[in-house]
Image: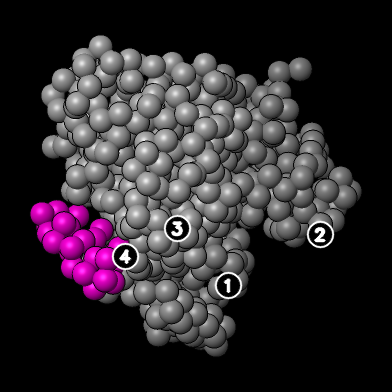
Amino acid sequence: MTLRFTVVVPTYQRRSQVLACVQALDAQRFTASYEVVVVEDGSTDGTARALRELDLAVPLTVIEQENLGAAAARNRGAAAARGTLLLFLDDDMEADADLLYEHDRLHRAGANAVVGHIPLHPESPASPIADGVREWAEGRLKRLAAPDGELTLHDLLTGQLSLSRALFERVGGFDTNFTQAGSFGGEDLDLGYRLQLLGCRIVFAPLAVTWQRYVVSPERYLRQWCEAGRSDVAFARKHPERAADVVALAGTETRAARRVWRPLLGTPVVGSAMRAVLRLGAIHACRASAGPVAKRLIFLSRRLEHLQGVREAGGLPSRGPIVALAYHAIADLDGDPVLGPYAVPPDEFDAHLVALRQRGYRFVDLDEVKRTLSGRPRLGSRGVMLTFDDCTEDLLSAALPVLERHQAPAAAFAVSGSMGGTNHWDTSKGARTQRLLDAAQLRSLGTAGVEIGAHSQTHSVLTQVPEPQMRREILGSVSDLTAAGVPRPRAFAYPYGAHDHRVREAVRGSGLCLAFTVEPGRIEPSVDAYAVPRVEVLRGDGPTGLTLKVWLARTRPALVPILDRFLRKARGA
């Protein structure tokens, strides 16, 4: 049987609130048929049993699932719906008796989606947080009910949102990447924006009222804002063209945030201590008082938690430059006359990544580099790309564990004609023999998150070989790696960094997206995609020397070689 409405309510660990929510829905003054579907998302508080024991007139379906998050729960409820229209409510919402009537009236008048008024329930426990919720809801009602009121992206909340089941299926439902188990936020903004992109008529209904019984503790409230910071980054990554709207709401780009809070949070010890002290003070103040001091403390702490969530997720989009780092062997080759200066021991490599993170840098992948070259926003204003030339075996045994520990993406460039062989181009000059990754090891590295690029077939100096050979070196390296089961390379690294116009054009013509040099500089839209700069990392740079090189590459690239000479002299090289 087809019903007019299915009300979908996801719930987790809030038995008393969802019971009140369902009982209010049972008291609707709505003459058409409707049902309620509650998706119990892994609760352990007896919610499902208590719901099934209710004596209701409205048909109620209770679906139990493991804890997968609100987005997955809403999708599960929508999949079980029999109604022509879906109304999504949060489990702490208590419906006015005319809620369904108001939604139905506006849909019959031509609305594609309807959002309503969600004032604070008068029985909500008094607290500075509840006061903030009440002020926000009253301000939203006043703004949207005005003659020139216009729904913004942040007004499209699933606390109360209705749309047709057909439209929900057309738009693809909720993106479950936003609300994994126990996380908070972002999925409603994403769904609302996708509705806007479809050109849907979304209407605010001031008489469609659900009262929010707000019982969130200060601890949970602050955790939610940290989670919301991560969700905002996820939204900005998916919809970079709307990143500015996320920034405006969060206040991440205010003067105080830029000049005070973000720099302090970027200092791990100071930032962690500051957050902990402020969080404890705000929680204590909220429990002791509902006055203005407690309110200021909780909202300042909220701002810091949101900024921390943004930091943890990699930062909001920026058009700032990226610095690419070129590593070679991750091994202790002290004394090797050829490779010694270019081999970084594993513990030193780990110290490099720690230092970069402490100074606010974020590790980015090849997609972020491509976004920057194209002028599109990317994540994080201080991006660093990690790259490795030659693909020696220590990349898998020594470098990969460090990369995984820091959750750092990377790219590695393989000499396709020597897969499973040795570094003959170095040993001919007196270097120690280094084993190179074979095809299976390269595939394993790729599966672990390191993108495999091409580094020619034989590691020749491409500017010094005849053109037919030069083209074979480039095209052959791509075809060799592809034939070995490695995903088709998107990037190339010039052996020894040697390139000229004809080499760059050959790489461009091969279908590769970009190519890296070993000339220091910053990656920005003005850079030729086939002459992308990289900063070579040398043994003994140390955490301080490396971060200084990265800073100079971003600001004064011409000074990087001077710093290199100074560092070499300082360590007696």
Q: Main secondary structure of the magenta part?
A: helix
Q: Quadrant of residue 237?
A: top left
**Relative to 166, residue 411 above or below:** below
Tell me if 80 is positioned left or right of 558 in this view. Answer: right
In the image, is residue 572 part of the stretch drawn in magenta?
yes
Where is residue 567 shown, x and y percent of the image?
23, 67
| Total residue callouts | 4
**Relative to 339, residue 428 above or below:** above
Residue 45 bears which disc, if any? Answer: 2
Q: Quadrant of residue 461?
A: top left
- Circle 2 packing at 10 Å, graded few (<14), some (14-19), many (20+), is few
Q: Which residue is mark 1?
A: 219
Name the mark nearer the viewer: 2 or 4: 4
**Relative to 478, residue 274 above or below:** below
Q: Which residue is mark 4?
A: 541
Mark 1 and mark 2 in contact? Answer it, CB < 8 Å: no
Seen at 40% across and 20% down, the residue is 478
